[in-house]
Image (spheres, grey):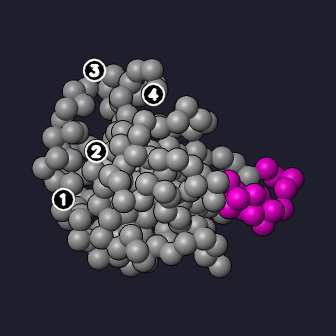
Amino acid sequence: MLAMQYEITLPADYDMGVIRDRVATRGHLMDAFPGLGIKAYLMRECGEDSPVNQYAPLYLWTAPEAMNTFLWGPGFQGIVRDFGRPEVQHWTGLSYEEGPASAALPRSATRLRSPMPPSAAPADVVDAALEESRRLAKAPGAVATALAADPRHWELLHFTLWDHAAPQEAGDRYEVLHLSRPERDQLGTGRQW
């Protein structure tokens, strides 16, 4: 599994209805994309929960070839044409687990990016993060949770979809506008190595 996200930060006075309309008319195009486990169409608006207006879809890929097909194909070129070329962040997947609300459509998502302490053994940090991921997967209202790591920057990514408003925990909170999940069942569960 590979996790991938790009963030398109928009002006404070940007009409976020444009993003809502874009997802409403184009979101379904990824609903059958080969090699895509999940694409969560995420948005946050400047206000109480966010310092910015942002469109920030997050992908969980089942294979690197699928991610490549998307990045070099027409779908991503539309993003580049309409918003410029965003930095594409990606992480190696460590775990994916469905929660008690896995059958529900998610309303919100949380994303927590955290650095691995330089003095700690990476395997110990990952083991602790896997425990946290399992805890999140069992939380009431959790649709699914994923854990991934970026060994270039020694960073962990916790991502959770919720069937209700996102909890007020550390990290970023998003509204989920649409969820494509053509190969969700191929993401696996638990520890992936």
Q: Secondary structure at mark 4?
A: loop
Residue 20, image x, y percentages = 21, 39
Q: Is residue 98 visible?
A: yes
Res 75 → quadrant: bottom left
Magenta stretch holds residue 127: yes
Position above or below: 170 against 27: above
Badge 2: few (under 14), some or many (20 or more) residues near its Cα, within 10 Å? some
Residue type pointed to by label 1: His
Disc 4 to disc 3: CB gap under 8 Å: no
Q: Position of residue 31 (x, y in %)?
A: 23, 65
Q: Residues within 10 Å of mark 3 (few under 14, many from 20)?
A: few
Predominant SS along the magenta part: helix
Q: Which residue is mark 2?
A: 177
Q: Amino acid under label 2?
A: Leu
Tell me the residue that label 1 is attached to.
28
Mark 3 = which residue? 13
Q: Is residue 166 left or right of residue 103?
A: right
Q: Is residue 69 left or right of residue 119?
A: left
Disc 4 or 3, which lies upstream in sequence?
3
Sequence order check: which comes first, mark 2 or mark 3?
A: 3
Residue 91 visible in this rendered orientation of the protein: no
Q: Position of residue 36 (x, y in %)?
A: 35, 70
Mark closest to the chain's N terminus, 4 or 1? 1
- The range drawn in magenta is 117-132
Foreground tag (3 vs 1): 1
